[in-house]
Amino acid sequence: MPPAIFIDSLVLSSMYILMASGLVLVFSIMGILNFAHGQFYMLGAYAIFYLFQQAGINFFISLALSAAIVGFVGILIERYIMRPIGQPIQAVVVTIALISVFEGLITLIAGPAPHSVTSAFPGNVDIFGVSLSSERLATVVIAVILIIALYLFIQRTRLGLALRAAAQQPVAAGLFGIQVARVSTLVMGIGCGLAALAGGIMAPMFYVDPWIGGQPLVMALLAIVIGGMGSLGGAVVGGIVLGMIGSMLAYYIGFWSQLISFGIVIVILLFRPQGLFGQSEK
């Protein structure tokens, strides 16, 4: 595989992993699939456009602010819409409705025309005689740091332990003093913030418009289905598989790459319906 294609595959994998990780966290704790997750990705991209491109704020500060702002929006939605509704199925319907709400609001505010974001890392880097895009290399590095930070947060902190306990045994966690409702609010904020981070780091490489969240959502859903519903490690593996396969197939066969990618997903699920790391129901 040419080095440039390999880097492109890592870029796509990074986006899929960040998106899928947020979806998995919300599903594990709250028991719902957030179908508006792609719109939080879109909001993160627009936040970078306004903060970095328009206001001239440092890219990393803009990225942190975008995650905080979008994460706060997710917290408000969980606290004042999803929690009063209570039922997972109705909450899923709400997330579907939010797709049109967010797309309509952004269209009213920013207009339907696509916007471009200037690269924060212009130019190329020569590695062993191969010229590679600085922007793509930086995107991979930033995404890897974020993924490692998420893993350490989940595995090594008291709050991460509370999240895992609430995901695995919510009733028992409540008996030990863990406030599952507050954990759900926090997880919604983290999940939406991860989607915003994915949108923010990808914004300089693509145009930003109100409808950019659709494909990242679909690929994130495929990643968690491949890896196993509720498995954070599975989301990482699923994102890598989709990113690598998608880039290689796009390079060699072009238009047909998406069709074959979906076919590979179907084959995996035929042999492992629960996903690569999911637990089979008996």
Image (tube, rainbow, N blue to C red):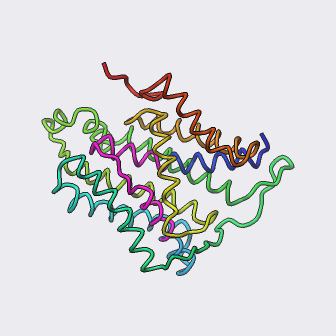
> Residue at position x 61%, y 42% from top?
259
**Was residue 181 drawn as part of the magenta stretch in this picture?**
no
Figure disc tally: 0
- Where residue 206 sits: x, y (%)? 62, 64
On screen, residue 217 above or below 49: above
Q: Residue at x 51, y 53 (%)?
A: 216
What residue is shown at x 66% (from left), y 43% (from top)? 257
Residue 28 within the magenta-colored segment of the rendering: yes
Identity of the residue furthest to the right in this view:
129
Quarter occupied by residue 134: bottom right
Please state which of residues 136 and 223 is positioned toward the viewer in this rendering. Answer: 223
Is residue 234 or residue 132 the one in the foreground?
Answer: 234
Q: Could you tell me residue 260's position as x and y percent?
A: 63, 38
Q: Is the magenta stretch mostly helix, strand or loop?
A: helix
Q: In which quarter of the image is the C terminus?
A: top left
Q: Is residue 256 left or right of residue 142?
A: right
Magenta range is: 18-46
User: Which residue is found at the position 66% from the left and 68% from the top?
Assistant: 119
The spot of residue 154 in percent (x, y) is 38, 41
Q: Position of residue 2 (x, y in %)?
A: 79, 43
Front residue (pair 226, 67): 226
- Quarter placement of the N terminus: top right
Q: Which residue lies furthest to the left in this view?
A: 175
